[in-house]
Amino acid sequence: MPLRILIDVRHIRDFGIGSYIRNLVHALGKVDTGNRYTLTARRDEVHEFAHLPRNFETIPYQRADTDLADQAAYPWFLRSWPADVYHIPLNSVPLLMPKPYVVTVHDMSRLLYQDRVSGWRNNLRLFLFRRGLLRADRIIAVSRATRRDVENLLNIPASRIRQIYNAPDPRFEQHSPAADARAAGPETRDFERRRILERYGITHPFLLYTGMIRPQKNIPRLIEAFASLRNELAEHPSYRELKLIIIGDEISRFPGVRRAAIQYRVENAVRFLGFVPFDTLRVFYEAAEAFVFPSLYEGFGLPPLEAMACGTPVVTSNLSSLPEAVGDAAMTVNPENVFDIARGIREVLLDRNLRDELRRKGFEQIRRFSWKRTAEEVLETYQEVAALAKAR
């Protein structure tokens, strides 16, 4: 008998989790034609799943999971769509969620950084976060580091946790510099890059950060390190006009990030961009002199791998899950030491042999991660949970 599997895909447009949902669902569509899948999506996002196989159906559900009423409304809605396994692909499980269900944990920052936010709403979210994981039949952790955090912070038995890696969006690999040279010719691609960058007024060499804007992302320290580095390179023929481009969401919620640029007198050299379309994001990755990601904490860390897929040297942290994700294909630094961040960036900028080596190793590193493999392991988890539920 085929399984009935229901996946909550309402966060398809989120910065990181949206990429996870999109790629997982499409990969499941390629590896599993036997089971039946139901996807719950917002009405204006149903079209995102129009080209899936016949064993997939998408049903509209409008209420956001940030609405407190959704704690009961979504489980009530699911009474009309019973399933053998439910999958919540992010750390937000409704209070009355029917079982059996699987949760994907992308990171444990809600618990590790809970002292940064206060108030009853946050306390309620933390309670629901803990309860949702404790009730889960299986937890998918996206890295060894995240698996350790789940075990240590919530005392959840290792037997209930599956470690299943994410992977970069395949579109980054399809449009790597090498692939572009084979497909459309480097001159055509270079022209397109210049056109997009000029649209954003970018004409100088730049470093790039992409990702969410959160305290643990360490962006004020990155800006301080950039200011120090820019002073060192003030007379350099290629890098005296070096810029820092920061692409991330909700910058307005964290005014300290902009204040750091003013404090270190680089406000004219740091550009803050919000959401950019995928093709534009890819161009920024490809055109950057280096991708810099000195995060203090990551559940997995996809942006460095996305940069590697675009042939860009990476400077990132030696903490949390990041060494696990990047291996020896990146320059790793101590993210709590401004001077070490600046040193790592300087070495990557000035050492051409190092840049070439990091590019080569980067292309090798991303081959370790595959959405096909991820989907196959997630499918095994569904089958395991469904079998255990039937045996009870």
Image (cartoon, helix red, strand yellow):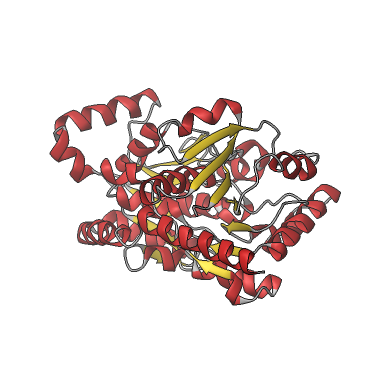
Specify whether 195 is left or right of 155.
left
Task: Check the image and name the residue furthest to the right.
Answer: 120
Quadrant of the image occupied by residue 60: top right
Residue 80 % position (x, y): 69, 39
Residue 245 % position (x, y): 44, 40
Between residue 81 and residue 174, name the one nearer to us. Answer: 81
Q: Residue at x 38, y 53 (%)?
A: 371
Image height of 92 relative to 337, above or below? above
Q: Residue 378: in sight, yes or no?
A: yes
Residue 21 % position (x, y): 50, 45
Q: Residue at x 20, y 38 (%)?
A: 180
Specify whether 255 is left or right of 203.
right
- In the rendered image, the quadrant that contains the C terminus is bottom right
Q: Residue at x 49, y 60 (%)?
A: 300
Between residue 159 and residue 163, name the one nearer to us. Answer: 159
Quadrant of the image occupied by residue 351: bottom left
Between residue 115 and residue 121, name the one nearer to us. Answer: 121
Residue 95 % position (x, y): 77, 52
Specify whether 365 is left or right of 265.
left
Q: Residue 320: in sight, yes or no?
A: no
Quadrant of the image occupied by residue 262: top right
Figure disc tally: 0
